[in-house]
Amino acid sequence: MLFLFGLFRFLDSDPILYLPFMIVPVLMAISSYQYIKKFSFNLVDEVLDVGDALIVRSGGREERIALADIMNVNYLPYGNPSQVSLSLRRTYPLHAAVVRPYH
């Protein structure tokens, strides 16, 4: 808040000089949102193993995915949280690729 007050106080002298200080935070906010959206917003709430299928719960919706429909499993250990990504043979309403936290 103090930063913005100081910035706007000096805008009267030469607005072009302070333009980068207004553009860079906006660009950082947009790129941060895109990064978080890509790596965190696609997580499901819960995945349960019921023998021949997985039950995936996300946002109050529930989907049953047969183990035969899973083509590939990728594990991404370096993120927080670690993630498991499933490539599926057919499209399910929740996601084309189910991603969930791995604990």
Image (cartoon, helix red, strand yellow):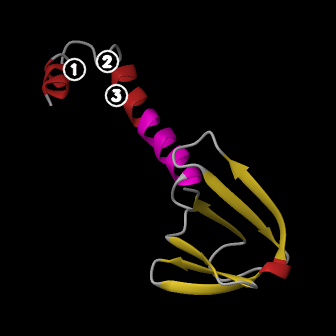
The nearer-to-camera label among 3 and 1 is 3
Q: Earlier in the sequence, mark 3 or mark 1?
A: 1
- Position of residue 51 measured from the top left corner of the image (x, y, whole percent): 71, 83
- Position of residue 41 measured from the top left corner of the image (x, y, whole percent): 51, 59
Quarter that holds the C terminus: bottom right
Marks 3 and 2 close (CB-CB < 8 Å): yes
Give 28 or 49, whichever is nearer the viewer: 49
Would you call the spot at circle 3 few (<14 residues within 10 Å), some (14-19), or many (20 or more)? few
Specify whether residue 90 is in view: no
Marks 1 and 2 close (CB-CB < 8 Å): yes
User: Per the image, is 33 magenta?
Assistant: yes
Q: Residue at x 52, y 49 (%)?
A: 81
Q: Provide the residue designation for mark 3.
A: 22
Q: Main secondary structure of the magenta part?
A: helix
Q: Secondary structure at mark 1?
A: loop
Q: Provide the residue designation for mark 1.
A: 11
Would you call the spot at circle 1 few (<14 residues within 10 Å), some (14-19), or many (20 or more)? few
Q: Earlier in the sequence, mark 1 or mark 2?
A: 1
Q: Secondary structure at mark 2?
A: loop
Which region is colored magenta? 27-39
Quarter that holds the N terminus: top left
Would you call the spot at circle 2 few (<14 residues within 10 Å), some (14-19), or many (20 or more)? some
| Distance from Cα at disc 1 to Cα at disc 2 | 7 Å
In which quadrant of the rendered view does residue 83 lie?
A: bottom right
Specify whether residue 96 is in view: yes
Q: Provide the residue designation for mark 2.
A: 18
The amino acid type, in three-letter code, at marker 1 is Leu
Please say if 66 is above or below 17.
Answer: below
Q: Residue at x 57, y 62 (%)?
A: 42
Please say if 95 is above or below 37.
Answer: below
